[in-house]
Structures are given as structure tokens and as C-alpha cells.
Amino acid sequence: MSKGSSNTGLFGWVSEINSDQWKAFYAALLGWTLDAMDLLLFAFAVGSIGKVFNLSEAWVGALFSVTLFSSAFGGAVFGVISDYIGRVRALTYSILLYSLFTGISAFAPTVTFLLVCRVFLGFGMGGEWASGEVLVAEKWPNEHRGKVIGMVQSGWGIGYILAAILATLIIPNLHEGVTYTIPILGIQMDGLDLGWRILFLIGVLPAFLVFYIRRHLDEPEVWKKNKVIRDEVKLSGKAQAFTLKQIFAPDLLRYTITATLLTSLCMIAYWGLYFWLPQFLASDKGVGLDTKGFIWIIPINIGAFIGCNTFGFISDKVGRRPVFVAYLLIMAVLVWFFGHATTLKEVLILGPFVGFFGTGFYSGFGAIFAEIFPTRARGTAQGFCYNVGRGVSAIAPPMIGYIVSLHGFAIGLTTVSVFAVAAAVVVMTLPETKGKALDLD
């Protein structure tokens, strides 16, 4: 326990956190928030993109899946990079990559060009999680690791809200069939085509976060110590091997397989629901609120924000496993009811709870994975397990899109409940790690 552990009250722990640890939190939170915003702008633009390029729902879902699939490679690569050159440097490179290619995709003249941009965006997106989550996990005290991972993860809900606000302000106000002239450039473009391009151009803004990170952050002490020992060839034989090889060695293989299976099941459930959520609200096949219905994503993600933070606080008290299982099972039940919603009233009642439990479980990944993998390969392990799972979840958008095209949103969204229940079963096979000190070797 840290020196200030005797502090009482709900926020007594705040005085135990030093300025360096808070700076790491701010950087990881902002990086993850803007990562979510850039990625999810696409979910609001799919209706326009589908019409502009004449794509079916399944093909639009497949286009998004490319981003998820490439994030698997990005996470694995940046995880390795973070173990060898540092968490901070890897974080900055990943943010630059995903933000720049979001901006470049705004100028896509063809689906192929857009596809290539989404590949590189996904590569950087995968790297951000692998770097940022490990950074705060290693910087913060053991007894508060669940809290900080939860607070960082809550940035996803904030990013989704930012994407919803931008989409609501831009897309409904640029009308299909109306030609607009772009200032300075003098280019004329139909409102249907212009709206999503403006959204993606705004997505370049996260690149400026890099300046803050490089100026204010230093590497975690546990990583520095590990690097010195590795450079002096004083680690154990197994720890001197290439980090990607280490996570498949007998001592870590079980955790690598289990963690990857867990993230795969969780993210199939998540992306099967959340990718199609804007269209569920807007489309006549769903609630039928038109594009102005995008704004009702906000109460859902307010629930997600609270759910992520609550998960961290509870898991620091009760334990990682029981909280993770509870969130997943409750999500499975709620999604069935939500998938059958037909009115705005039902959306407003159920939505925040779906957000709370259907996103809050994400806070479990960073803490559990940091605690079951050693420092020598932690970045590699987290980057690989989390992002390979995200890559596997690439099947979710086109799969649910296909089901929706045949049977409607009720059956399509309800399908994800099966994966949530399966994920809860997998969680039970992991050890309880609450408050565990991080292993060096």
C-alpha cells in the first residue's frame, strides 16, 4: 500500500497520486478519447459513404472491418515497440498515424483509396491502446490500477459522444441533392458527399496531442529498470528472447490464448452492437429517427462513461473477475430488450444502461492483462491479445449487417448476447489479480 492509503472517503485516494502519474493519465485518456472519435466518425458516415460509393450494408460493414483487422497488426507491432523503445514514444507514433490517415481519408476519390487509409488508421489505433494502457498501469500505484484503467477507458464514451455531436452538427445540415462550394478551393460537391469528408478532416486534430506527450511525459520506472537489466543481459534466459516469442513460451502461453479469446468474444459482442447503433437509431429498419437521431447516442455513452469508471472503482474493492462477469451477463440481457426497441422513449430508458454495461467491461482488460503478464513482455502481450481480439471482431459488422438485411435489427443486435455470455465464461478461467504488484521478470 502507498503512504497515503490511510486516506478515507470516496476521493481520499486522489492525494496519493503524484503529478507525473496524473500527466500519464491525461495523455492516455486524451489519446484513447480521440482514438475513439476518429474511429467512430465512420459509424456515423456509413449511410452517406454507402450511397456515394453504392455499397450494401454488408460491404460497408466489411470496409469498417478492415480497420479492426489492421488494428490487430498495429497492436502487436506497437506492443513490441513499446517494450523495446518505451511506452511514451510508441504512444506518440501511434497517435500520429491514426490521426493523419483519418484526415487523409477525407480526400478519398475511390473506395480503394478509402480502404487503404482505413488500414493505416487501424494500425495506429491498435498501437495507441497497447501503449497508453500499459503506460498508466505501470505508473500508478497497484491498489489504484483498476481506477485509472477505468478512467482511461471511459474516454471511449467521450470519444463516441464527440463523434455523435460532430455528425449531428454536420451531416443533417448538408443536404443530399444540394451543391455546396468549398471556400478557397472553389470545389463544388453534393452535400451527401461533403458531410462525411468534413468529419474525417476534423479527425486530424489528435495529432497535436503528440506535442504535449513528448514534452511532459517520461517512461515508467519499472520499464526503465527492465530496460537496463535487458541491455546488460541480466534477465533470465526466457526473458532475453524476443518479446513476441516470450508470450508463446510455456510460462505465458495459457494467458496469451485465454486473453486473446476473451477480447475476441467481447469485441464481437461490442462491435456487433455499436457499429450498427447509429443506423439502428436512424434507419426505418430500426427506431426510424433519421440522421437527427444520432444525437441520442449521447445518453448511451454517458452511461458508458459512468460504467467504465464504476468498473474500475468496484474492481479495486471486490476483484476483477466477479465485476467483469456481472457486466457481461447484464449486457447480454439488456441488449435483447434494446434490440426490440421501436420508440425514442425505449431508447432513452434502456440506452444508458446498455452503455453502462455494454462498454464498462472494457475497463477490465487493461488491469487484468497488466497483472498477469510481466514487465519484460507486457506491452507485447497486451498489444497482441487485445488487438488480435479486435482483429477477430472484424467479422462482427458485416455479419450483423447481413443478419439485419435479412431479419431486421431486433435479431441482428440480439445476436451479440451469445458472445457476451461466452466471454463471461472465459473470464472465470483467469486468476484473480486485484492489487497485484507488477512482475519485472
Image (cartoon, rainbow, N blue to C red):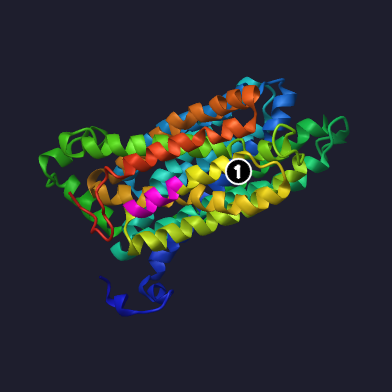
For image coordinates 16% across by 39% down, the residue present is 251
For label 1, the residue is: 338
Residue 79 visible, this angle? no
Residue at the (25%, 56%) spot, across then down? 222
The span picked out in magenta is 321-329
| Secondary structure of the residue carrying numbered label 1 | helix
Prevalent SS, magenta region? helix
Camera-nearest residue between 364 and 220:
364
Instruction: Answer left or right for 187 relative to 435.
Output: right
Q: Can you give x and y, in whole percent of width and height, for residue 309 in the image?
A: 47, 60
Q: Is residue 393 above or below residue 335?
A: above
Instruction: Classify residue 40 by image quadrant.
Output: top right
Q: Nearer the viewer, residue 11 or 93?
A: 11
Left or right for 98, reference 223? right
Tell me where residue 354 appears, x and y as whole percent.
55, 49
- On screen, residue 200 above or below 131: above
Q: Nearer the viewer, residue 319 or 82?
A: 319
Is 322 contained in the magenta span?
Answer: yes
- What residue lies at 60% left-to-right and 43% top-to-bottom? 338
Q: Identify residue type, mark 1.
A: Phe
Relative image position of residue 419 (x, y in whole percent)? 44, 35
Above-or-below relation of 174 to 228: above
Residue 56 picture location, percent across and down: 67, 21
